[in-house]
Each structure stands twice: as C-alpha cells, then as structure tokens.
Amino acid sequence: MTSESQVGSDATQINCVHPRSSKQFSAEIDAATTGRDVINGLIEAGFIDPATGKDAYGLEHVRTHRSLPLSSTLVPTVSSGDTLQVVLAQAAAGSLSPSDLRSRLAFDHRVIRGMTSPILARVEAYEDDAAYRAGRALDLAGGNAGRASVYVVDYRMRTMVSPGLEARGATAVLRLLAGSDYPMSEPLAVFGSRPLPFSPHVADSGTVCLGHGWAAARGRMLAGQLICHLARILNFDWPSTHPGYSPAAYAFAMNQLKGRPIEPALEYPALPIDVAYGIGARMGAFRTATTAETARPVRFTGVRRFHAIAGGRT
C-alpha cells in the first residue's frame, strides 16, 4: 500500500491521457510500478471506468509511440515528466454492427483519399496502433475494405511553435476507434511532431481538444473533416475565446494576429464531392471547446505503488 506520505524524492512524475478525450491525470510512480499498477490506479481514482477483459486498456509512450507492457515496470523506460496515452486495446463499436462499422471506415477512407490540397504532404492509413508502430501502412484495397482506423497526416504549411518561431508543418495521428462507439464517440487526435504546434487547443502531450463538436454531430462528422479542422488549428483559423491549454498562444492570437489566421488565403483540404455528395452542408459545422479540462486534486489510498496528484474525472 502507498499513501501520500510514503511517496519519496525518488518518485517519477507522469501524465496520463484519457483514451476517449484530451483529459489528463498526473501521478507519481516508483521503480516497482508496473503498467498494470497505473491502469488500476487510474480506475481507482475514477479517471477511467473499469473495463471488461484483462487487457482492455493499454499504455503507449507518447514521445516514442511505443506500447508499454502492462506486466513490466515502467522505470527507467518512462522518465519524469513523460506522458502516457491510455488506449483501448479491445475497443468495439456499440452502435454499429461490425459490418456497418467496416462500411463507415471504408467510406472515411474513400473520402480522405479523395481530398486534395497543397498543404497535405502525406496521408497514410493503418489498420490499428500495432500496425502503425510497426510501420505497416495499408494499401488502397485494404483501406477501401474498411480496415483503416489510424491515420498519419503530414501538413505542409506555416504554423507557429512559439510566439516568435514559425514551423513549416506538423504531423498528426488520428485514432478513429479511440472511443468505444465510433462514429458516435470522438476520435483521438494527437500532434506527434516536435516542437508542438503553438495553440490553445493543443495540450503539452500533443493531444488536441475537440470539445463537444464531434458528439453534437451524432455520428455525422467525417474523419476527413477532422483533417480539415486540424489544418485550421495550425493556421490559427479557429475562434479562441479562452486561453485553453496555452494562455501564451491565446494572447498571441488576440494581440499579435488580432484574431486573424496566419495565412488568410490558405487552401484547405476539401471533401471530394463525388464521394461525399449528399452528406449535407451542415456537416462542415465543427465547434470545439477552447478550455482545457480543469485539474482537480485526487487523493486516495490502497493502490499499490501509484500516487495520484491531479486529474479530470470522466
């Protein structure tokens, strides 16, 4: 058992990202802490719900994109300040049958493959996280068969990484099945390139806050529209009414850019009319929350080798 008073100076502080949202949870671990201890600690703290199946949750190191074995100790693979993404290893759609889900994923793939824009340098599709980590991209036939659930998107465009420093692009990873009920549940969007984009909508882990827009669309939002949305975030072409994850980025948008985008005439990716025709003009309405989840102190005992500091509850 580990109580707060027993956490010593040799503790390693980590941040954990929720599998279905951008919420984060801070905790301290020690040299004996395993991945399973972390999962159990997050469940005990109420940050994630108990899941069915022994390995329903997994952990991925955000910086290295490597999966962390739950049965092994995390230190020294994980260092103080590192961010761990909690992933659903056995995620399954609740509202769509397996065949309907495959049809939806196939439709997403056809739309994405039909999108053209000079700012899209590379778009690759992967069957799942394991295939992504192994670099096994899907071919056109595999994507059109509804097997793609992870996308890597390289943007070639001006963006900011600090108030006075521009970058020529960024890389985002989209996990469509990060929730348990796609397309009703929102995908997980994470910027994996470093330095991170400078934005009120981007957390220190690279996770993008999508707010309530996806849920409000009730399954009518497409993955291709999310790709467009991320481009607007990179271009500061999305309203920010709150400092969100970065007060400095919010101040830059208001004071330096005066609420205007970096490139007002930027040509954003467009959905292919021949594929997406009939979806409806309202599909383009995507509203994001601009506030980061407020961290609340969480204190508990009884979870071995895991000490909670703060985090958002689901």
Image (tube, rainbow, N blue to C red):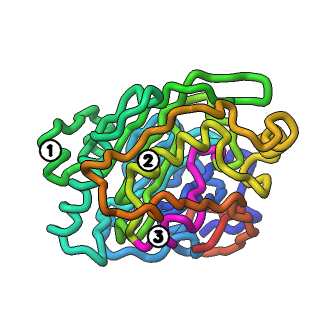
Q: Nearer the viewer, mark 2 or mark 3?
A: 3
Q: Nearer the viewer, residue 189 or 159?
A: 159
Which residue does the numbered mark 3 point to in the structure image?
Answer: 217
Q: Nearer the viewer, residue 82 or 254?
A: 254
Q: From which residue to which does the magenta span run?
A: 202-218
Residue drawn at point x = 36 percent, y = 34 percent: 116
User: Quick one: quadrant of the C terminus?
Assistant: bottom right
Q: What residue type is labelled 1?
A: Gly
Residue drawn at point x = 76 percent, y = 46 percent: 246
Q: Which of marks 2 and 1 is in front?
A: 1
- Cα–Cα gap, marks 2 and 1: 25 Å
Residue drawn at point x = 37 percent, y = 47 percent: 271
Q: Which amino acid does label 3 sit on?
A: Ala
10 Å crowding of disc 3: few (<14), some (14-19), many (20+):
some
Q: Where is residue 305 in the image (x, y as percent from the top left)?
A: 58, 60
**Residue 37 lies in the magenta-colored region:** no
Q: Is residue 263 above or below residue 125?
A: above
Residue drawn at point x = 64 percent, y = 66 percent: 2
Which residue does the numbered mark 1 point to in the structure image?
Answer: 142
